[in-house]
Every structure is written in C-alpha cells, then in structure tokens.
Amino acid sequence: MGGLKEIALTIIVGLLLMVLLPLGVDTFTLTVLCIYALLGLSLGFIWGFGGILCFGQAAFFGLGAYAYAIAAINFGTPWAPFFIAIIVPALIAAVFGGMLFFGRLNDVYLAVLTLVFTLILYKFMNVTAGENYVIGKARLGGYNGIPGFETLSLPWDPSEYIYGDSLFYFSLTLLLLVFLGLRWLLKSPFGRVMIGVRENELRAELMGYDVRMVKTAVFAIGGGVAGLSGCLYANWAEIVTPNLFSLGQSAEVIIWVIVGGAGTLFGPILGAAIMGYLKFLLGQQSLIDNTLVMGAVLVLAVLLLPRGIFPVITDLFTRRVGRGKKANRKSSRRGRRRREGSDAK
Amino acid sequence: MLNDIVVEARDLTVRFDGVVALDNVNLKLQRNELRCLIGPNGAGKSTFFKCLAGMQVPTSGEMIVEAEVTTGYDPFRIARLGIGIKTQVPSVMDGLTVHENIWLAARRTQSTRKANGIVDDILERLKLGDLSRLDVSTLAHGQRQIVELGIVLAGDPWLVLLDEPAAGLTGDEVERMVNVIKEINDYATLIVVEHDMHFIRQIAKMVTVFHQGRVLIEEDVDTVLSDPIVRDVYLGKRR
Amino acid sequence: MKIDRRKFVAGTAAAGTLAFLPKMAMAGETIKVGSILDTSGIFDLYGKPMDKAVTLAIEELNAAGGIAGKMLEKVAYDTQSNMALYTQFAQKLTRQDKVDVVHGGILSASREAIRPTLRKSKTLYFYNVQYEGGVCDRNIFCTGVTPAQQAEVLVPYAMEKWGKKIYILAADYNYGQITAKWIEHYAGKAGGSVVKTDFFPLDVADFGSTIAKIQEAAPDMIMSALVGGAHLSFYRQWAAAGMNKKIPMASTTLGAGNEQVVLTKEEGDGILLAYSFSKELDRPENKAFLDKWQKRFGSTDDIHELAVATYQGMHLWGAGANKAGSVERDKVVEALESGVSITGPSGKITIDPKTHHVVTDVHIVEVGDQKMNVVKSYDQRQPVDTQAVCDLSANPGDTTQYEIKI
Amino acid sequence: MDYAAVVIVEILYGISVLVLISAGLAVVFGMMRVINLAHGEFITLGGYAAITAHSLGVPIFISTLIVAPIVVAIFGLVVERLIVRFLYGRLINTMLATWGLSLLMIGGMTMIFGNTTTGIPTPISGFTLGRYQMSGYNLFVIFMAIVTVMIIYGVLKTTRAGLIARGAMQNPEMANAFGYNTSRIYMLTFTAGAALSGLAGGVMAPLVGLNPASGANYIAKAFITVISGGTSVVSGLLSSATLFGSVSQIVTFISTSVVGEIALLIAAVILLRLLPTGITGRFLKDRV
C-alpha cells in the first residue's frame, strides 16, 4: 500500500512548510491561514466526498469558537474546552444533519436550511448583549462577542502560553493530523461507503446501507473539524464575535473549496491558503475593493475552472511526467466535478 | 414446503394525484419461485416492483415479506432483509470502478477480506474480470446492467428483484443474463419485470400479467402467452 | 514651510539608516505612532475622518517641535471593518513596527480584541471613541464621552421640555444596553419614568410594528440610542408616519457619524442630542481647528465627534509625553495621571487620573436644517459611570471592563 | 379595535414586503430553475438607481417605479449574457456564480457610492387610523405588491409571451422544435426577473437607509420565501409570503423584531422539513 509512503511524504512536506513558510510571511498570518485551511478542509470533506453542499459551514466554525470561549471562561483551563470545542459542533451537526437527512432533504433545500441555520445563530448571538444571556460564568456579549478567555497553554506548564510562533506550529501540526486522518478515513470501508453514497444514493441504499446515517456521520465529522478550526481561531484572535456566523464567512469557505477544487482534500487547503493570503494582501491597498476581487474570483472560478486549481495542476503534472495510464486515470477520476453530482440525477 | 409463501401483497393500491397506478393488487410468491411480471407500459408492474423494493409507499394495502409487514420500509431496510434489487435504469456508482461497486455491496455484511473474495468470485461468474479496474461510467449500457447484477449478487440475497434486466443487452449478453438468472434461481427466489416476450419465454415458469393497475391473469408461461386477452392487451396498447 | 522641514527631517532619518548610522542610534530618531482604524468597510464612515485627525495631529505636534525633540511618524493599518484584522495588525504594530503608542479602535469589540495584546506588549493605548464606559486598565486612556456624561445632561433637559414618560429605543449591543440603563437612571432621578425599552440588533431596518407599539404606549418623548446605517431607517419611517410632529425625540447617538446630513430636514429637525463637540460650537479653538482641517483636507463636511475625540486624544498624549520628556509608557502614564489637560475644539478636557477617562464639556444640540445647533453647554462633566467602578490609583493592576450596576 | 386594525395593516405590509422582494427571484426560480443569489444586490442596485435619479432631479415616482426597474433590467440582461447563460441546468453552479456576482456587486457599489448610508424622503405623508398615526407609504407598498402579483399572473396566464415562456421552460426541446428560440426566452425571463428586483429596490428605497451591503437583508428572506413556496411562481410566492409575513409580524408584535425574524427562520425550517419540495410541491401543484 502507498499509505506509509503518503504519511511520510505528508510529514516531510509539513516539516518543510514549518521551516520555510515563516521565512516569507509572519507566523501570525500563517496561523490564520492554517485555521482557514482546516475550515476549508471540513467543507471539502463533506462536499467533495460526502456530496453534501453546506451553505452554512461557518455555523460550526462559530460554534467551535464560542464553545471554546464559553468553556474556557467557566473552567479557567484550556484543554477541556479544546475538546469541548470539537465535540459540541460535531454533536450539533449530528442532530441538525440528522434532522435534514432523515427528512431526505437534498440539493437546494439542503442549501437553504444550512444557510438558515447559520442565520439563526447569527441573529441569536447578536441579541445576547443583555445580562440574562449567561452560560455558567460566561456572558455571551451580543454583538461585541466574548473577549478575555484563557488561551491554550502547555498542559504541563499552564504559565507557558501557546501563542505566536508556537500557535502556528501547533495549528499546522493539527492541520496535518486532520489531513492524514481524513485520508485514512476515506480509505477505510466507511470512507468507501461514503463515496459510494455520493456517487449513487439509491444504489447505496439498495445495497442495504442507511444513507441517512452515513450522511449524518459525514456531516458530524465535518462539523467537528470546523469546530476545531473555530477553536484555534478563538485562540488566535483572543475574542469571538457573532461575525463568525456571518453569511460572508460561509461564502468565503465555499470560495476556498471551489478555487482549490472540490473532490480532493488538498484542494480546499490550497484554496484557503491562497485566498486567505490574497485577502490579506488586498487589505494593504485601497485601490480596489476587497469584496469585489473575491466575488470576481468566485465567478471566474465557476465559469473557467469548475474543477478548481488543484486538479488542474495535478493533471498538468501527470501529463508532463507521463506516469502512464493508471496515474492519469486516477487523477482525472478524483478531479471529476463533484459539485453537480446531485444535479445530474 | 410447497405452500411456503415468502412474498405477499394484500390489496395493494397506489394513487398519484388521482391516477390509480395499482388497484387492489393481491399477489403471492412461493419460495424458490421465478416469477415474471409483464404487461404494457403503465400497467402497474413497475409500480408494484417499487412498492416491494421500498422505493414507493403504497396508498393503502400491505406488503408482507416472510411474515414481516414491510409496507413503507425504506429501501435499505428491504435490502437488509436479504433482498437484492436491480432497478430499471441501471443504478450503479459511476465514479467508482467495477471492483469497487461490487466490493461495496459485499462489504456491508462481510469483513474486508471476505468481501474481496466474494468480489473475485462474482467477477469470474459474470466474466467481468477484464473490466474490474475500469470506472463504471466508461462502460456500455449492457455492461452496466451486468455490473448491477453483480452488485445484487454480492449481497448474497435469497430474494432477487430484477426490473427489465434484458433491456439494452446484445444477443450474447442476453444469453449470459438468461444463464445467470437460471443459476440464481437454483438457490434464490426471483421476481423479474420484463416486457421482452422473447426473453420471458427463455426464463419464465409462472407469469403475472398486469393491466391497468390490476392483475389480469396469473398462469404458467405457455398458457399466458397463448391467451387471446393477453394478446389483445399487448397489441391494443403497443407492439 | 512646515512640510519642507518635516520632509527634511524624515529624509535625513532615512538617509541615516541607509548610509552609516548603526541601528541602535537610529531607533531613537523618530517616535512611531501606531494607528489602527477601519478606513474601509462598513465602519469607514467613522474611521476615515479619524485617520485624518491622526494625520493632522501628528503634523501639528511635529510642527511644534515634536516630542522631546524627536519627530513623530505615523504607522497606520486599515482593519477593513473586520474584527479579525485588529488582532493581526495589533501584533504587527507591537512586534514588527515596535510603535511607542497606539491610537485607534472604533467598535468596543475591536478595542477588546487588541487591549490584551497591547497590555502584554506594554504598549500605551488610546481609545478615542464615544463608548459604553467601564474600561478600567492602566494601559489605556479612553478620551471619548461616555453614556452617563451624555444622559446626565440630556435626559433632564429633554424631560423638562417635553414631559416625564420616556420610551427608549436602543441598539442591541453593549453600548445600547448600558446607555439605556443610564437613561433610565437619570429619568428616575428627575422624577420621570421609562414606559418601555426596545432593543434592536444592528441589522434591523423595519420599524413599522415598533412605531405602532410606541403609539400604543403613548410616551411624552423618545430617547434613541440606535446605531448604524440600518437603524437610520427608523428616523425615516418615523417621519413617514408623521410621528415626528407628534412625539419629540432625543438621542445619544444620532450625529456621531454625521447622520443628520443623510436625513432630510423634515426627518431630522428638532431632535435633541448631547455631545462634547459640534461643528457649530462657537469657540475660537473650534474655529481654528475647522480652518486647519479645511486647509489640510479641503472640506470639513466629514468631521464628527469621533474625529475630534481622536484629534484631542492625540494631543492629550502629546501633552503627557512632553511633560514626561519621553514616550516611555510608564513615564507618560505618570505624567497624564498628574492631571494633564488641553483645550481642544470641544473645550477643555482633562484626564481623570483614577479612571483614565476624560472630564469634558458636554453640549445639548438640536438638529436643525441638517446642522447640529448648540442649545446649551455644560462645563467639565466627570465620567461618573466609570468612576463608580474604577479606581486605578487604588488598584493599578486592574484590567477589567466593568459592567456598571446602577 | 384601532390597534387591531393597525396590527392587520402591519401584517399585510409584512407580507407585501416579502412578496416584493421575492418576486424577481420567484420568477427566475419558478420558470428557469435558477437561483440568483445576487438577487439582494439587484434590489440594492435598484435602490441606488432610484436615489441617483432622484438626486439628478427626476421626479420621485419616476425614479422609483420606472428608472430603477429599467436600470436593473439592463444590468440583468448583461449578467445573463456574460454569466448565467453558460450555467443553465446546473443549479448549484449558478448559485455559486451568482453568489460571486453578489460579492462583486457589493464591492463595486462600495467603490462607486461609498459606504455611507443614503436614502430618499418618503413621498406620501402619514394618515390617521383611529388614534394611531400610520405611514401612508406602507399602504403604497401593499398596493405595489398587489400590482406586481397581478402583472406576473397576467403575463404568465393570459399573454402569448407568457404561454410560450411557460412551454419553453417545461420542455425546451419541444419549444425549439416549434421554432421558438429558447435561449432568447431564457434571456428575456431573466431580464424580467431583474426588472422586478429593480422595482422592489425602487419601492423600498424611501423606507430604508441604503448601503452597498443592504442586499444581505433581502436575499436570505427572499431565498427562503421562494424555496418554501416551491416552483409555482404566483401561488408559491403568495402562500409562503403570507405564511412567513404573518408569522414574523405577529411574533414581532408579541415580542421583538428579532424574535420575529427568528420565528420566520424556524417556520421555514419546520416547513421544509415537513414539505421538502415547498408548499406548491405538495399542494396547489398545477397552478401558475
């Protein structure tokens, strides 16, 4: 199997990135790019491999961030909140996803309801400024959000905070671990069933698989990864605000995945990193509006690069190197557009 | 064992927006039977098939499989009763290889190792070995039909439901399909929906003819095919 | 002439770095003033004039000889109305640019996002915005007016004019919630009552049912602490229903971003406000300030309360640093705590040493013909809200933002 | 009693606003199965067109009721030619591309009009209902919603163009075979939808403070209304707007406007969970 080789390669690439990236860009920015990459990965996973287009992935990102902030204020220690920030969004995704999938909702209806879910959270969080909105010791704070919670520190030395450079190394390590974990998952029997469901729900059902459960599980995993991303974000920004749930945030995740390429795991990571950095660069000039560029990129990506950047690069690469039929076939298969999977039927 | 009824439909009725697709259908099926359902388009045979497969919830009436009322079951629960289903338009996983398609079907009940063995067996039985590493989407229609049959067999069903298995097959492939169906019938009960008379002649024993949502006649194949009313139904409607 | 001299100084400094001066010597050449504001995105209405105010104040301080003989240099970042960028740029200001002071932040959320970063890196921070009050932290100076300072004068004045029953409409966030409490507090003190308080998230733009509810409650006056573009719809819908002729209104927020210009005369006329600044303020310092702004930027149309607070915040810091003879944080803080005061466009402002807030004049203003006409001025109002909870001379290690219980 | 009348007018007004802001989206979705996520920005653009025209001295009703729809219709036509026409039949891709368009428009309008909130005065004065003072413009909004619905219904049901359009949408090959140019029909339908959005923007302009990001307030509600209504343009629009408008306004009167909005969203979740294809997917199927 190529499994070991792939793990080794991922680790080497990861180590290289850890050493090389800080030479060019400050680690504070790199950390947030890692966080975005995790968020992109979570959507890339459920959309590209589970066939679930979620218009509200920001919901689980925000839930992770809020869960961390609220738990950290109540516990005063960072590590239990760290895990809570993964588990809570995963559970909420499981319950909400279960409601959708057991109701056999698909396509545009799924898109609407995930969007509505995010909107409800956004609106709710915005009206929690009053002093009766308290969870334990934590005030929800409404529009202003929650500042001033304990951030991650070394488990054996709570006075040694993980921030700055170390937060970057920590985030990048988690990104690599999640990447490898999802790769492994996709190769496992569950992963294959999941891809089977994406390819043909009816057939998976006729084989005896409970499609609703499979999709709910996929959605919950995506929610957990998004939650982890939100948790890191809370540690990075040291404040959480309702804007984490905004439509703009959801839109950005989708842009990352499209630009990078749905149907691959690496694509969304690449898309998030490129677009995140582009946004950062655009922020340093005032000639062209930032939103305008993001919008133009999305329109052009859908029209000209419907498969995303990463599959195109791999295609070019395999063609040039000419690794023979097998490699070509595989990459083109992986790169096939997943987005319209449900439309085609 | 002669009266071992495994499938029974009781007063099964399906209505769509006022149109009656199935009208009080009663039908019984014995273990190890090979039953063909025929009838012109819109006669209700496919609707009946869907009710049995869990793809259509009847308006009223009951479907009973081995003493279990399955009315309104989702397809996956039907499948988990040990029922293999091939749909009218081949339902396969396009982006996956032939091997992966069949493996997924076998893996639901078996360990990974056993599933691999089952896949090899089936590939051999259906002579799909050459195609096993190709994406199903690249295959011709007939080949896809065979792959779907492989998927059905991989679940090791005791009851097999086939909707128009011969549609779009070449002469050779039809022959292979006939043999496979006969082979399956050695150990499993079969329901075949079909309107290709030539094909039915080759496999059928008992035939149920549907017409306008009702069971018109239920007899052995020779009686049915020589029945003047059946002829009229077919000629009157089509062909 | 000023400009030439500045250019010359900056030029020598730059040449110095490149050519021969060792880095250590260079570090003392200029004083870096960090500015972190939303100059694009939905808050740029507030941020752009504030950014200009920073520029103008730096130019003036330099023209007056800089601080302790050193020239000031502006290091500015645009946070694009995005809270995430605040932390990012605050890190950049403290770690890479190593600035000597940071002025900026607009929303309370943005202030709370960067306050810990600046405290940890021991960088002095000035927050120059009208806000909800209660921040108690030795590293920060808040030079904007707070709710108690406004409500204390506005509520009794309006009640005397219009009656005792008040209906409060407020933005549903920290600022609105706290302001509503202060309005209620001062209404009670003056013998009035609040019939109802409604809170609205910042994106609510439809007030039809609210207008009906207000009529049902039949108050003598409305107190509004509505904030932002969407809430502007209230004033128009209120006027569209003809209500502005029936129930009068006062506000602690309208006009902070020059909203009175967006509303028509019919919609805005007669609304009472309370601010530390108005362009119509008839004082020589104000006239001089407006002149300088006009010369430097071409138009005074965009000047508002927050821009003036920023301008004065810069000068307060400059006065403190000059008194200390250094820009070192602890020395500047000590100097400011000794009671530095300046006279700016809005009048005399003094640092309150216990709270690091300001004692300032507050003016009752009436909107008329899209202008903010001063009706009555109250001199030197204490930041009584923050004073109720914060005493930095007793607890210098305090870093909380208190929710003031009334 | 007066209060009850006020509440009823407000409910009607709530429904009418939903009808107005959803009509353009409903036509495009119902006829073409295209979800235009830039719909909110189309409305905002209509608002800006009306305000700009008004500030140039065009009379207010001409600015809002004529200039706004025409400007947005032209813009819609360009968008259809440049973007949407390449994506017909690919629902998700159209949603994504138009979402990009929405961001692009927000950015563009920010660069052109700035972030400042603007508006135009209300052209109709208030009136008294018992002891209550009401906005006369609210009645005008209700009137315009009725007119809009009647126009859509009239065009679809009684004109030749509507008949051809409906035929072409249901069976493009057939329409092609009859010699109708389906590409042209799609183009005109999209343009008509854009004009309706522009009209909504014009009608809403005197009521709200407009800024480039205002569209977000419209799109979510319009999107939910249209999807919940299902694919029948008029009956779907009317039924879901009535449901959501009543729910949100009644809850707003009992509680606060945010609870009203959240009630609307929750109603949508429950509705779609129970009727996954929208109201007209289940009932009122064969209506226009």
Image (tube, coloured by chain):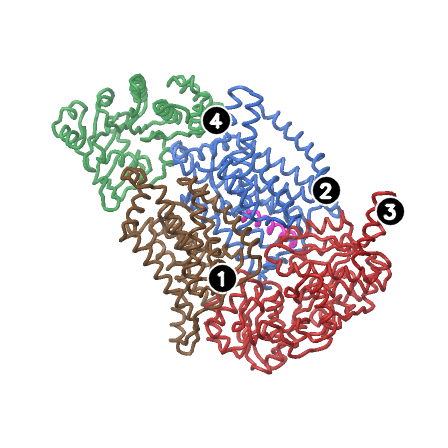
Chain colours: A blue, B green, C red, D brown
Measure how far apart labels 1 and 4 are at the Cα level: 69 Å
Residue C272 x, y percent position in the rendering: 59, 75
- Report whether C102 appears left or right of A80: right
- Report whether D74 appears left or right of D285: right
Instruction: Name the residue that disc number 2 marks.
Output: A165
Measure how far apart labels 3 and 1 are at the Cα level: 58 Å
Q: Which residue is rendered at x = 75% and y = 58% of the image?
A: C125
Helix, strand or loop status at disc 1: helix
- Report whether C315 appears left or right of B186: right
Q: Quadrant of the N terminus of chain D?
A: bottom left
Q: Which residue is rendered at x = 58% and y = 66% of the image?
A: C259
Residue A117 x, y percent position in the rendering: 49, 51
Q: Depth-wise, is mark 2 or mark 3 nearer the camera?
A: 3
Instruction: Name the residue that disc number 1 marks.
Output: D51
In the rendered image, residues at marks 2 and 4 fall on the same chain? no
Q: Residues within 10 Å of mark 4 (few under 14, many from 20)?
A: few
Q: Are marks 3 and 4 in contact (CB under 8 Å)?
A: no
Three-letter residue code for mark 4: Ser
Measure how far apart labels 2 and 4 are at the Cα level: 46 Å
Q: Is residue C69 above or below residue C339?
A: above
- The circle drawn on residue C24 is 3
Q: Quadrant of residue B155?
A: top left
> Label 3 marks which chain's residue?
C
Report the magenta stretch's main SS.
helix
In the image, which residues are magenta? A58-76
The answer to if C239 sits in the magenta stretch is no
Q: Is residue A213 above or below residue B197?
A: below
Three-letter residue code for mark 1: Ile
Three-letter residue code for mark 3: Met
